[in-house]
Image: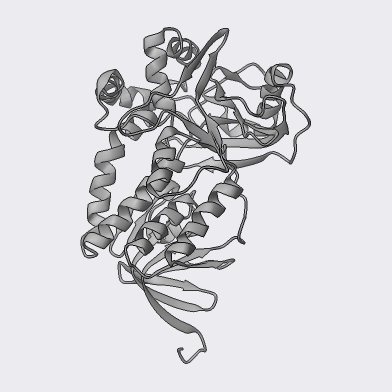
């Protein structure tokens, strides 16, 4: 205890944020023998506004963390809708990812993960807001209401950019796109459907095409998660009313899903899709805080789980080089795909490209199969086959077109 009465502690890893990315870091590190303290500003069992969908990639990560999915609703695949065209496809099975996903409301998913962190030996502290402590340009731990914790590594798992990101210089890149989404729950007799549903040709109440999609994610508990998201590259984005967009989408699916009244007030959230920095001396950002969100579907739980496990593994192998190795390995795994997604966001910000492009995305079986892998986060830098080839060609093509796309982007 110092002279002010505040306590000073020490640990190997301090984690700011107890969502999937922070919990995955804590689980992996604690199981490897590290002393871990997690600071979660919310209470135990707090909800996190989200679509609740888990891709096969996320299921693979949860399996690696030994998290039972018995409480989740199993999902066989994805139903994609573009205008009058519909394709219902099952998730592909591979050596890397299982052939199924899930829907698991975040209140229950996050509780299962943080419980596993506690069981692994992590010290989880709820309703405690923590901030990085700097010594020059190095993070040496965190401060909180009751004192200071010195840590060899501080992990920012804080979700969308906020105060912690600003302190670390890890804000979103201003010239890159981001997303906004809104969701709620409604009762439906189709709550146990085996497929997620995504309407790719989304329009607002004025009939304006919106780069984004509307979703129906059956939760298997009597309800469906209904929501929609939009990218910042569309014309009039700043004036977009998400509640009206959700009502327009609800009207579209009301009869087919026989929806009841909304179970709660619709809640919106921001989807970061870039970051200026994801590491520095003594710290690393994981999950959404590192900008690891797929611009083409808004999904990031799987990336959060993977990045959390990665930084924990690298720290266990060599604490001195962990943050630099983390930045390199995350870049090798995700950067090309996420960069291509952001450039694609500028492309579909043009309404005429959006309309024709999304019809093409489900127009043929071969292209729909690739769209399925993109929507399932099953594509990254080393993906074999057609999807990987298309990603690499698109990366080169959109790189050449990027200056024009940015110059001609729609006014938000």
Q: Can you see residue 394?
A: yes
Residue 140 in the image: state x and y as whole percent: 34, 71
Quadrant hosting residue 58: top left
- Vertical position of residue 361 compared to residue 317: above or below: above
Along the viewing direction, whichever of 254 and 142 lies nearer the viewer: 254
Q: Is residue 209 left or right of residue 327?
A: right
Identify the residue shown where x is 69% and y is 38%.
266
Residue 127 in the image: state x and y as whole percent: 59, 66
Q: Can you see residue 346?
A: no
Q: Is residue 405 left or right of residue 298?
A: left
Quadrant hosting residue 186: top right
- Vertical position of residue 56 compared to residue 143: above or below: above
Q: Is residue 193 left or right of residue 19?
A: right
Residue 399 in the image: state x and y as whole percent: 27, 26
Identify the residue shown where x is 48% and y is 64%.
118
Which residue of the protein is positioned furthest toward the bottom in this rendering? 3
Tell me, what colour scheme is on the image? one colour
Quadrant hosting residue 61: top left
Identify the residue shown where x is 55% and y is 17%.
201
Identify the residue shown where x is 43% and y is 10%.
360
**Total tally of numbered discs in the picture:** 0
Residue 211 in the image: state x and y as whole percent: 51, 24
């Amino acid at each position: 205890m110092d002279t002010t009465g505040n306590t000073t502690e020490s640990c190997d890893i301090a984690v700011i944020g107890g969502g999937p990315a922070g919990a995955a870091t804590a689980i992996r590190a604690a199981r490897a023998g590290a002393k871990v303290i997690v600071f979660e500003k919310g209470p135990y069992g707090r909800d996190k506004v989200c679509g609740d969908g888990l891709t096969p990639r996320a299921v693979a990560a949860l399996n690696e963390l030994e998290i039972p999915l018995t409480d989740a609703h199993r999902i066989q695949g994805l139903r994609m809708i573009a205008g009058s065209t519909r394709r219902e496809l099952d998730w592909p099975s591979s050596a890397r990812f299982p052939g199924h996903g899930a829907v698991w409301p975040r209140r229950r998913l996050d509780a299962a993960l943080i419980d596993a962190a506690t069981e692994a030996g992590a010290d989880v502290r709820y309703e405690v807001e923590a901030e990085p402590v700097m010594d020059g340009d190095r993070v040496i731990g965190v401060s909180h209401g009751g004192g200071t914790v010195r840590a060899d590594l501080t992990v920012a798992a804080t979700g969308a950019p906020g105060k912690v990101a600003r302190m670390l210089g890890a804000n979103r890149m201003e010239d890159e796109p981001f997303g906004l989404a809104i969701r709620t729950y409604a009762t439906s007799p189709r709550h146990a459907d085996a497929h997620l549903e995504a309407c790719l040709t989304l329009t607002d109440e004025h009939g304006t095409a919106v780069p984004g999609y509307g979703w129906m994610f059956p939760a298997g508990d009597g309800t469906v998660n209904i929501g929609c998201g939009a990218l910042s590259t569309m014309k009039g984005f700043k004036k977009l009313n998400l509640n009206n967009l959700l009502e327009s989408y609800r009207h579209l699916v009301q009869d087919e899903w026989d929806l009841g009244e909304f179970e709660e007030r619709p809640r919106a959230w921001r989807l970061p899709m870039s970051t200026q920095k994801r590491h520095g001396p003594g710290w690393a950002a994981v999950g959404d805080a590192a900008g690891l969100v797929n611009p083409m579907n808004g999904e990031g739980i799987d990336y959060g789980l993977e990045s959390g496990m990665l930084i924990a593994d690298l720290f266990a192998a060599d604490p001195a080089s962990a943050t630099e190795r983390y930045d390199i390995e995350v870049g090798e795994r995700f950067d090309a795909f996420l960069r291509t997604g952001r450039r694609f966001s500028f492309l579909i910000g043009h309404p005429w490209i959006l309309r024709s492009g999304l019809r093409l995305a489900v127009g043929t079986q071969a292209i729909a199969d690739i769209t399925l892998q993109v929507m399932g986060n099953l594509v990254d830098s080393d993906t074999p086959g057609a999807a990987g080839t298309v990603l690499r060609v698109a990366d080169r093509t959109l790189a050449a077109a990027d200056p024009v796309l940015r110059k001609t982007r729609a006014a938000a």
